[in-house]
Image (cartoon, rainbow, N blue to C red):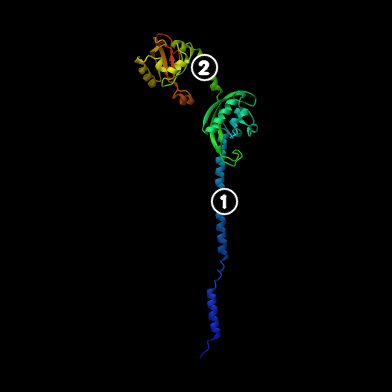
Amino acid sequence: MTTPDKPTTLRAAAEAQLAATPQPTPARPVADLLYELQVHQIELEMQNEALRQTQLAFEQQRDRYLDLYEFAPVGYLTLSPEGIITEVNLTGVKLLGRERKALLQHRFAACVAPEDRDVWMRQFLSVKQHAAPLSVELALQRGDGSVFQAQLEYSPQKVMSGTIAAGGADQRAQRVALFDISERKANEMAYRTLFENSMDAVLLTSPDGGIHAANLAAQKMFDRSEAELCRMGRDGVVDPTDSRLEQALAVRETNGSFQGELTFIRKNGVKFRRGFVSGICRQRQAADDQHGGARYHRQTQGGECPGEERGTISTGL
């Protein structure tokens, strides 16, 4: 019986154990490690440049927005649900005649003329309740005490819960566009004076023939009050058997105006002929939206149709 070579057996066992033991990864060359570090550094620099460009684009967009907001020809301000001014642009500051710091975090009610504050409070509560855009007119008071007529366009904006303005609940702030309409109101007043004192019969109507106002001369001509004329409309003052009415309306719609003669009816049923001038007059958009396209109608008091335009300004015939 032979005895195995002991050194040989031990070597074989040691090799088997070594083979079963995980071997450490050979160290990478220094050049490879340096290359990887350089690539990673370049990647970080590229990412940083992309972030810088994105931030620059955001800043440019923000600056454009601020320019548009600050220097817009319309006054803009934001009211909290409590009616406190939280934002106001430069035009708004100028319109209200106060320093910005005197407006921010102060109640807008202080900018409303005393005689209109109750009206403003009701309007503001209505806007908050219905959460819908609304256009209103108010008398506002500048810092020096002077008063001007303004139009306010409300646009609700949701305030996220948890903010100071929201008081921990979802509410709506109000974005407000502010316009000075003093000149327009003055023109309307001047027009109203001319309307009321005109020697000619004046009817303010809409294209569908509804009458919205009648001056004293028109009331006298038809022997009816303004309320009666408004209730009756065109069908109550123009003889329905007069075939010239349809032609007059068609010509006016095509040419923009018409001058001729029609038969009208007084309260007592007596029919009478009068010359008239009627034309389409496009007024401001607000009037178009309200009346479906503003028009004017001139009607003379003479028995014959004169050469010049006399009489009424209206929105129809």
Q: For residue 48, which numbered disc appears in the image?
A: 1
Residue at x 54% of width, y 83% of height: 9
Q: Quadrant of residue 120?
A: top right
Residue tagged by mark 2? Answer: 192
Q: Secondary structure at mark 1?
A: helix
Work out whether residue 63 or residue 297 is closer to the camera in this orientation and state it. Answer: 297
Residue 277: x and y in percent read 42, 15
Residue at x 55% of width, y 82% of height: 10
Q: Secondary structure at mark 2?
A: helix
Label 1 packing within 10 angstroms: few (<14), some (14-19), many (20+): few
Q: Number of marks in the image?
A: 2
Label 2 packing within 10 angstroms: few (<14), some (14-19), many (20+): few
The three-letter amino acid code for the residue at tag 1 is: Asn
Residue 125: x and y in percent read 56, 31
The C terminus appears in which quarter of the rendering?
top left
Residue 200 shows up from this direction: no
> Eyeballing the image, is 271 above or below 158?
above
Residue 110: x and y in percent read 63, 28
How far apart are the two marked residues, 2 and 1, measured between alpha carbons?
67 Å
> Eyeballing the image, is 251 above or below 73?
above
Residue 293: x and y in percent read 44, 24
Work out whether residue 64 or residue 88 is closer to the camera in this orientation and state it. Answer: 88
> Eyeballing the image, is 165 above or below 17?
above
Residue at x 50% of width, y 14% of height: 196
Residue at x 54% of width, y 75% of height: 18
Q: Quadrant of residue 123?
A: top right
Q: Determine whether label 2 and label 1 are within 8 Å by CB.
A: no
Q: Quadrant of residue 260?
A: top left
Q: For residue 158, which numbered disc appears in the image?
A: none
The three-letter amino acid code for the residue at tag 2 is: Arg
Residue 249 shows up from this direction: yes
> Which residue is most to the bottom?
1
